[in-house]
Image (spheres, rainbow, N blue to C red):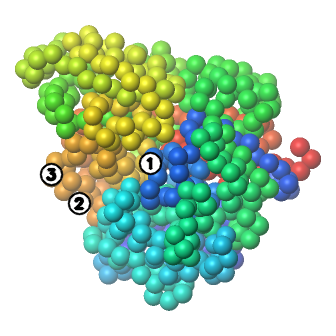
Amino acid sequence: MKVDKTILTSLGLVVSLTAGLTVLANAQTAEADRSATLRYTQGAGPAGFDPPFAKNMFQELGYELPIYDTLVQLDYTGKINPGLATSWEFSDGGKTLTFKLRPGVKFIDGTNVDAAAVAKSMMRTKTDPESKLAGLLKSFDSFEAKDPLTVVAKLNVADVNVLYTLVANPGMIVSAKALDDKVNLNEKPTGSGPYKLVTSGPQGASYERNDDYFNKDQNQFAKVNMTLIVDTNARLNAILTGQQDVGLFQLDQTYPKVQEMVKSGKFQAPSFLQPNNYPIYLNTKIKPLDNPKVRQALNLAIDRDLINQGLQFGECQPSAQPFPPGVVGYDATLTPKKDVAKAKQLIQEANVGPISFDMLVNVSEPYASMGVAVKEQWSAIGVNVNIIPANSTAIRPQFRAGNHGAMLHALSAPSPDPASLIDGALLTPDNPGGMSPEFVKAVNEAKTKALGSPEREAAYKAISKMVYDDPPQVYICWAKAIMLGRKDLVGLDKTAYINALSIPDFRNYSLPKGK
């Protein structure tokens, strides 16, 4: 990839390309059984398959990754690799981004994945009035086809993080013919990915291999079945009894059983520290949560150590800032504090009268138990919370409607990058009250700082301090995700996308022949 010195400094990213196929999967130690079916289970079902209009982009990501390609992909280390684009180059001071497309790729409807199709799909995501993802493409002005294999993206600001945005739903490319023909993509999603959707419903989705896919290492199964099992005990038992091959788990009451299963030698359970939190989203558009003293009091009333030890087996690092260790902007001096006396004092100073509001809580564990703990801890400072259980499909749309005071759910972002974490959590409808102009200005300035530079580190530490001092969300602890699966499942320890989201990418899994 050709990159001039100015952009190399600002991008901080070097891509190694081969003339042939880019292999993103881990090296296989045995020949894969391409006739096998992968049975995967998680705690959320699909709500749609048209990327810009998904009700919950993070929940839909896992169901859409098999279907749609993106220009660039995220690997299990959090690095960006080629996808539909084999190379890319920044120019014009970082405001022009040129992609060279992989030749010979086709959508499942037989049409070519060319620059015109890519530009049309990306502009739809950016400009359609109903697009839920347009805000994540705000740094882009346009996408244009320069020639059949060259896409030129114009940016309105030098933003070193835009490639991370394109690894997830905002970067998914839909067939231009399907758009022209007004195909219902929720029923017939038309991408160029390694698998094709066969059936879908509230309980999951099934796929079959796209045999024409350009990367055979990403479609090692003849079929894939993704099944919704909300109850974590039932999900674990489905793997234990061989009904399912692999599933996603958090640190909840099933964790001791997970450890037992691993000790038996029949299962594996690699864990992944995530740049995502268990936050309580606050609706600062409603009173009294618009009052900074009230929010500070709610923050000080949380006993994070108790929640960690009692509900997370001591594995969830308490937090009071938006970035975890290892991510640019993390500041070890911004430690979480519990001070009930100070919290009560702040409530009195706020002088807002009795405080009572509804809090949406994900019905899955560990959210449900955390919600009960938070309710009890806030009651100690005179705050009454009415818990409203909600499933993972409905919880974000319910909160975004603006009628509830809080939401306890996962904090998710498209990539393990500070800009993605801030944009995904604080500059989206998940933060109905928005952020101050000063905060937005600081975020925009941070995006211009060179990757790996002291200036970028300082900029994001300043942003973290702003959130720490005036929390729009109450952070609890940094989560771990666990992939529990059969011992012979290859690639489980190198699961991509889970390093940014509680959404794993199974495209690099395989089962060896003879198993």
* 3D distance between C-alphas at marks 3 and 2: 11 Å
Give the residue displayed 49% in from the left and 58% down from the top: 51
Mark 3 lies on residue: 438
Crowd around label 2: few <14 · some 14–19 · many ≥20 (10 Å): some
Q: Residue 2's mark?
A: none
User: Which-is-in-front pick, marks 3 and 2?
Assistant: 3
In the rendered view, tell whether residue 2 sits above or below residue 464.
below
Q: Earlier in the sequence, mark 3 or mark 2?
A: 3
Give the residue displayed 74% in from the left and 31% down from the top: 239
Q: Is residue 9 left or right of residue 357?
A: right
Q: Is residue 411 left or right of residue 100?
A: left
Q: Amino acid at mark 3?
A: Glu
Q: Which quarter of the figure is the C terminus placed in? A: top right
The reply to whether the C-beta atoms of the residues labelled 2 and 1 are less than 8 Å apart is: no
In the rendered view, tell whether residue 237 sits above or below residue 152.
above
Mark 2 lies on residue: 445
Asked whether residue 18 is in view, the answer is: no
**Quarter-of-image position of residue 211:** bottom right
The reply to whether the C-beta atoms of the residues labelled 3 and 2 are less than 8 Å apart is: no
Q: Which residue is at the front of the view, 343 or 64?
A: 64
Q: Earlier in the sequence, mark 3 or mark 1?
A: 1
Q: Which residue is at the front of the view, 386 or 476?
A: 386
* 3D distance between C-alphas at marks 3 and 1: 30 Å
Q: Amino acid at mark 1?
A: Lys
Crowd around label 1: few <14 · some 14–19 · many ≥20 (10 Å): many
Mark 1 lies on residue: 55
